[in-house]
Amino acid sequence: MEYLSPLWLTLKVAALATLLALALGVVAARALGRGGGIVRDAAESLLTLPLVLPPTVLGYYLLVVLGRNGVVGSWLHETFGISLIFTWQGAVIAAAIAAFPLVLRAARAAFREVDPQLERAASTLGLNPVAVFFRVSLPLAWRGICAGALLAFARAMGEFGATLMVAGSLPGRTQTLSIAIYNAVMAGDDATAQTLVVIALVVAVVALVLAAQVLQRNRPGDDDAA
């Protein structure tokens, strides 16, 4: 079916973008720590910019960085012969950057809920910081991080502007659901547009419902009530 190609590509791009945003978001949240302060607040605000910038502005800056004349793009092309523009890999990067702030904010909030006394106790028992993170902090914060990842997945699925500017609209190669819907509307193909909208809506709602369930279970006192 003609709907399967953009659906499969969207799911692939959204899944890989979520994994990338998850890894970067957790590392950034841990690096920012629990405290506040001007420097940390400024850093978090800067990292949250992709959430508030217009998608086309974000896409423009990605083109500047990832294009063959950009710092990263020229290095990749000259060193490895890789070009990310008009590829599904470029779509993954665009969607990941757009979804990254959702993971960052959720992960930072989750790490703040971890009892620091438990981390200090683990350190006292001889665990190094890396072991404390993977054996204490991350297991206690996983529900909040998981909720952020599900929200990031929904955000990556709906990404349009940045993805269009970086990856274009090549059917079967870079045309995601949101771009396919736009093309169908512009072509006057209402039936195809409505079908694609329903598919995108169902997948996004499922992701949001799962995120809500995870957040509900992560509320303080739930474990005691159980």
Image (spheres, rainbow, N blue to C red):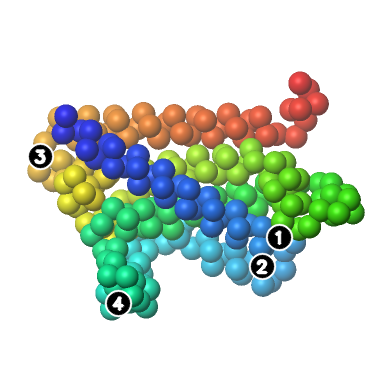
- Residue 1 position within the rendered picture, expressed as x and y whole percent measured from the top left: 16, 29
Which mark sits nearer the N-terminus, 2 or 3? 2
Residue 188's disc is: 3
Q: Local crowd at mark 4 within 10 Å, few (<14), some, or many (≥20)?
A: few
Tell me the CA gap for discs 1 and 4: 37 Å
Q: Residue type at mark 3? A: Gly
The CA span between labels 4 and 3 is 42 Å
Q: Work out whether mark 4 precedes mark 3 in sequence or the reverse, and give the earlier one.
A: 4
- Cα distance between the residues tagged 2 and 3: 49 Å
Callout 3 secondary element? loop
Residue 15, by quadrant, is: top left
Looking at the picture, how far across and down is residue 220, in whole percent? 75, 34
Checking the image for residue 33, the label placed there is 1
Please give left or right for residue 191 compared with residue 206 in the image.
left
Q: How much space separates mark 2 and mark 4, taking CA atoms?
A: 36 Å
Return the disc, 2 or 1, that comes first in the chain's sequence: 1
Along the viewing direction, whichever of 33 and 79 lies nearer the viewer: 79
**Mark closest to the chain's N terminus, 3 or 1:** 1
Query: Could you tell whether 52 is left or right of 58 in the image?
Result: right
> Image height check: is 92 above or below 61?
above
Q: Which mark is residue 45?
A: none
- Residue at the spot of label 4: 78
Circles 2 and 1, Cβ within 8 Å, touching? The answer is yes
Q: Amino acid at mark 2?
A: Arg
Q: Point out residue 65 in the picture as x, y percentages from the top left corner.
A: 36, 72
Mark 3 or 1, closer to the camera: 1
To which residue does mark 2 refer? 40
* Structural crowding at the residue carrying mark 1, measured as other residues with C-alpha within 10 Å and reported as few (<14), some (14–19) or many (≥20): few
Label 4 sits on a secondary structure element that is helix
